[in-house]
Amino acid sequence: MRNSAVSQRPAPHLEFAPPAPEGRQRSLVIAIAAHAALFLALALATQWRTQPQVVQAEAELWSATPQAAAPRLQEPPPAPQPEPEPPKPEPKPEPKAKPTPPPTPDPEIERRDAQIALEKKKQLEKKKEAEKLEKEKAELKRKEREKEEKAAKEKAEKEKKAQEDKALEKKKAAEKAEADAKKRKQDDAKKAADAKADAARMDAMRNENLKRMQGLAGASGGENATGSALKSSGPSSSYAGRLVGRIKPNISYPGDVAGNPRAEVEVKVSPDGTILSRRIVQTSGNRAWDDAVLRAIDKTEVFPKDTDGRVPSVIVLGFRPQD
C-alpha cells in the first residue's frame, strides 16, 4: 500500500506541467512496457542456459492519470530446436553423350592402304627369310669347318700315336733283343761253367768211387794204376746221364723256373739198385724246384744197373729244369 501511495504521488517536476494528451500517454506506456518486456526477454535468454529456475519479475507503472494495467508478460516459449537438414539428394548421373560415329572411310583409300600393308608384310617376310637362310648357311659352314678341324686333329693325333707306338715297339724290341742276347750269353756262360763243373764233379765222383771200389775189392796200387780191376770198378761215363733221364720224367713242377738253376742231389743205393736215401748237397736257389727233384727220385724207387751189372752205392746227380 505504501508503494502504491508513493507511486500515486506525482513527480515534482510534473505537478504543474500541463496534462499530456491521452493518446501520447498510452503510446509512452506501451513503449515502456515493450522495452521492459524486451529487457526481460534478454535477461531470460542470457540466464536460460545457466539457471535451472526462471526468475519472474513484475513491475507496475503509474502515470499521472489512471490507466489500465498492462497485461502480464508471459514467459516466451523455448526456442524451437533446429530440424536436421535433410540429406542432399545424390546428383543424377549426367547422361552419356552418344559417341559420334566415325566418318565412313573411303573404300578406295582402304583398298590402297591394305595393299600397301600387304606389300610391306611381304617384304618383311622376304627379308626375314633371307636372314634365316644366311644364318643357316653360316651355321652350316661353321659346322663343316669344325668337322674338318676335328677330323684333321684326330688324324694328327692318330698319326702321332702311331709314330709313338712304333717308336715304343721298336725300343721294346731292341731292349728285348738286347736282354735276350745278354740272357743267352749269360745262359751259355753258365751252361759252360755248369758243364765244366759237372765234368769235374763227375771225375771227382768217379775217382772217389774207384777208390772205394778198390778198397772193397782189396785192390792195391795208386790212383793211376792200370790194372783191369781198377778200371772195372767205377760207373760208366753215361751212367749218370741215364739216371737223370730216368728220374726227370717223374718231376712234377707246376710253375716256371726263372733261369736254369741246378740242384745237386746225393743218392745212396743198395747193391740191387734200391734207393736208400737222398739229400740236397747244392741247392738251386729255388726251394720248390729242389723239392720237386727229391719227390721225383722217391718216385723212381730203383736205379738200373750199369753196363758192368753193378750199381754204385753213392752217386751225385745234377738236375736243371731246361736241360
Image: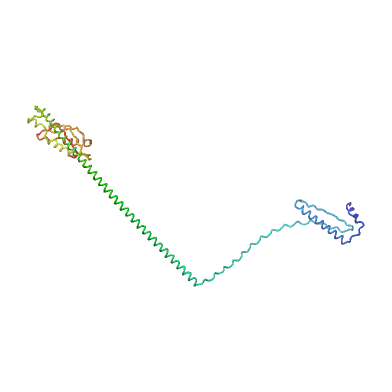
Q: Nearer the viewer, residue 83 or 282?
A: 282
Farthest residue in the right direction? 16
Q: Quadrant of residue 213?
A: top left
Q: Work out whether 118 lies above or below 275.
A: below
Tell me which corner region of the image, top left, top right, bottom left or bottom right, holds residue 241. Answer: top left
Count of marks placed on residues:
0
In the picture, measured across the screen, residue 161 lies left or right of residue 217, that is right
Q: Quadrant of the C terminus?
A: top left
Task: List x then y, in percent, for residue 61.
Answer: 86, 56
Relative image position of residue 26 (x, y in whole percent): 86, 60
Residue 33 rendering spot, x and y as whole percentages: 83, 57
Q: How far across and how far down the image is residue 96, in percent?
A: 59, 66
Outermost left residue: 228
Q: Nearer the viewer, residue 14 or 72?
A: 14
Type of colouring: rainbow
Give the left or right position of residue 243, taking residue 109 as reference.
left
- 10 vs 76, nearest the viewer: 10
